[in-house]
Image (spheres, rainbow, N blue to C red):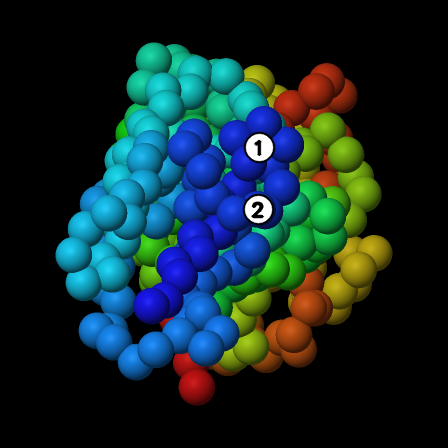
Amino acid sequence: MATIVPLGVDSVTGQTKLAGAGDTLGGGGAPLLLRANSGASVGPRPRLNVVGDVGGVLTSTSDSVPNNEVVLALATPAVVVQTTSVVIGATDNGKTFVTTGAGASPVTFTLPSPTNGFRVRIYSDHVGGSSAVAVSGATIRLGGYVTPANGTLASSLGVGSFVELVADGTNWKATSYTGVWTVIQAGVLGIRVFDSDPSLFVFRNVDFNSTADQPLYLNASRFIVRRVVAANATVSLTTAAGGIYTGAGKTGTAIVPAAQTYAALTASNKFLDLTLDASTGTDVFTLPAGTPWYFSLTTPQGVAATGDVYIWGDATP
């Protein structure tokens, strides 16, 4: 004889315990434990039949079948339509959140502490975009990119971006994704991963009403700059002027010169190719890990204004 001991997440308290009806399997980092009874006689090897997915809700159990066979009946993990920001709870393990109907408003999913084996899926099905935010000092990794502690992973604006996040007990990993997701650096601007292509970096919500240094983390050690574009301005940028520098305090090489103006950005659907320093036509740039460039205006807009900056280039060995 043998005993099948399934572990689950209590549907009310979120604590790991022996699973019962209404609980979610997968707690404690091990969906199922198989233990042999002390002094059990040698007999047929017990078998385990699972109906449904780990992460589903345990609806019933049965051990009254031949050959020591134990059957667990699992409900399929729920698909939840989510149109507003939400804090994901312990009982949401295995769920898929779909943002159909959220309109132009962004939807933020605050993740729980990264309990080993916790899994959640997010499908951004609205034009406002979605984001996942880590807590408890956890990071979120997407391919070769990782957020800092308590960082954010954000989808592009538009329909069709999907990500599956799995906790390893300390941090979160994107085990699969489609579309465009941005790894956001805490307190600075972000790095856009464009379908796993590192040649496009997008820095969202650049402040065009500030003359302070705004770090741009390209997260590439060696690269060639081909093009820099500004777009998606929230107001007509009639006054703002300034550039992009390799050093803080408007020092180093001015990749985009201080005299650069943005008056062509009269609406959010306008874009502007920025003037580039001559070095971009000849040099391969090298950046030590964690070292940013800086977007730094010499003249602010004078009213609240943001926009996006896109850097195209080629990563090199």
- Of mark 2 and mark 1, the one earlier in the sequence is 2
| Quarter of the C terminus within the rendering | bottom left
Residue 277 in view of the camera: no
Q: Amino acid at mark 1?
A: Gly
Query: Which numbered marker is on residue 256?
Result: none
Query: Which numbered marker is on residue 89?
Result: 1
Image quarter of residue 42: bottom left
Query: What's the residue at 65%, 74% (across, down)?
Result: 289
Horizontal relation, residue 146 to residue 46: left or right: right
Query: What's the residue at 21%, 73% (across, down)?
Result: 44
Q: Amino acid at mark 2?
A: Lys
Horizontal relation, residue 42 to residue 35: left or right: left
Secondary-structure class at tag 1: loop
According to the image, label 2 marks what residue? 17
User: Quick one: label 1, few (<14), some, or many (20+) residues within 10 Å?
Assistant: few
Image: 277 above or below 241: below
Query: What's the residue at 83%, 56% (across, down)?
Result: 249
Secondary-structure class at tag 2: strand
Image quarter of residue 316: bottom left
Residue 225, position in %: x, y?
A: 46, 66
Residue 91, position in %: x, y?
A: 51, 33
